[in-house]
Amino acid sequence: MDKRASIAGLLSEIDDMCPLGFAIALHIKYNAPTFLFQTFPENWMENYSRNGLVIRDPAVRWSFENTGFIRWRDLALDDPSGVMEQSRLFGLTYGFTYSIHNDTSRTLAGFARADRDYLDVEIQDIAAKLHELDVVTAGIQALSRTDTDALQEMSIRMTHR
């Protein structure tokens, strides 16, 4: 299977495990990701962007300082701007953040659901897919128009630099 088919397959599998969506920033170098895949609710992404929440988001801050995962509920005490509370107003009640740091870049991701916290085994499964996605996208600078269109048909919003 070629890399691009693997990317679409992994994103589809992750999407199936995230009822309220995800945001995956792959291979961040100099604070900009090579690829950003998002399926969070549109109204949340608009609010997040419009209000510049990325610079105050405790999940993003945690991801730049740590590796592994943290459940969003564990970030509540380190959220003076109330980003986590705002996310709950948009239905993103339960979730976790996962961070991968390697020698050349960072990959950060958040995964959400409304009904319950993720089980440890679910986090491990999603993390394994994220690690695979991190490896398969290494060195790719852009996706073709066909690949981009296919991801958009899956309701995965994508940006890349």
Image (cartoon, grey):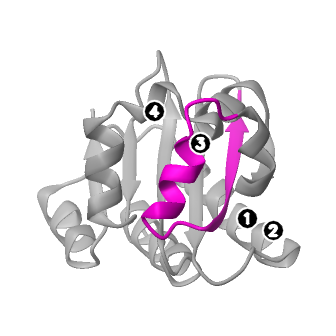
105 left or right of 160 in image: right
Q: Earlier in the sequence, mark 4 or mark 3?
A: 4
Q: Nearer the viewer, mark 2 or mark 4?
A: 4
Q: Residue 137: tell me if it is visible.
A: no
Q: Earlier in the sequence, mark 1 or mark 4?
A: 4
Q: What crowding class fits label 4: few (fewer than 14 Cα within 10 Å), some (14-19), or many (20 or more)? A: few
Q: Is 48 in front, or is 140?
A: 48
11 left or right of 17 in image: left
Q: What crowding class fits label 2: few (fewer than 14 Cα within 10 Å), some (14-19), or many (20 or more)? A: few
Residue at image mark 3: 108
Q: What crowding class fits label 3: few (fewer than 14 Cα within 10 Å), some (14-19), or many (20 or more)? A: many
Residue at image mark 1: 128
- Which image quadrant is residue 120 in? bottom right
Q: Residue 81: tell me if it is visible.
A: yes
Q: Earlier in the sequence, mark 3 or mark 2?
A: 3
- Amino acid of disc 2: Gln
Residue at image mark 4: 54
Asked if the residue at tag 4 contacts the one at tag 2, i.e. Cβ–Cβ closer than 8 Å, the answer is no
